[in-house]
Amino acid sequence: MLLASGVNFGLKRTLPHVLGISAGMALLMMAAGLGLAQAFERLPWLYTALETLSVAYLLYLAWKIGTSSSVQMRKAERRPMRFYEAIAFQWINPKAWMMELTAATTIHLHASLSLNAALMSAVFVVIGLPCITAWAAFGISLRRFLADTRRLRMFNLTIAALLVLSLYPIVARFFA
């Protein structure tokens, strides 16, 4: 999404989307660290269900990317995502939930649950913000390169394949 936004709108207009993702991830990390992770520890089947849904969603996303013929958005969507929309999207984004819950249940920077949640939120902002900004900037730098439909097709297939390959650890755990 950030790559497409960078291609279509440039970095300045994509910045609210970038900042919204970062803020949304920090808020979700606080929620996960302060209680949702404990709920998933008590009801492990819920985590397994979320993980399964996340894998299914990511496979669907890989399919959509791999079969996409354009990075252009439909005319009705000719604006970048707003700050509050990007925050809200994290709460329905299975990838975000999977990442946040995994971090909340496996990474312990402090013995205090509330301080650990705050520290993890800070880590997500400090590390995540430059990474997601790079995706938007990468979109800007690819604008001319992706104008060629053959290159765009190869790029989409490569990104889709990498997304599918990133699921290997989760899928391997299902069959272990």
Image (spheres, grey):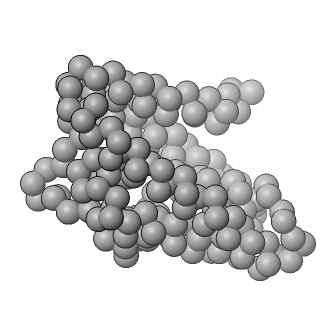
Measuring from the top left, give residue 82's x and y in whole percent. 31, 71
Q: Is residue 167 visible?
A: yes
Which quadrant of the structure image shows residue 125? Answer: bottom right
Tell how many labels: 0
Q: Is residue 160 left or right of residue 100?
A: left
In front of the other: 2 or 50? 2
In front of the other: 65 or 57? 65
Measuring 38% from the left and 39% from the top, which residue is drawn there?
61
Outermost residue to the left: 75
Which corner quadrant holds the C terminus?
A: top right
Measuring from the top left, give residue 46's x and y in whole percent. 62, 56
Measuring 9% from the left and 54% from the top, which residue is drawn there?
75
Q: Is residue 89 left or right of residue 37?
A: left
Compared with 11, 156 (above or below) is above
Measuring from the top left, give residue 127's x and y in whole percent. 64, 58
Q: Is residue 68 visible?
A: no
Measuring 27% from the left and 40% from the top, which residue is drawn there?
143
In front of the other: 94 or 157? 157
Measuring 20% from the left and 63% from the top, which residue is drawn there?
79
Outermost residue to the right: 111
Measuring from the top left, give residue 38's x and y in whole percent. 74, 68
Which quadrant of the structure image shows residue 36? Answer: bottom right
Q: Is residue 22 left or right of residue 41?
A: left
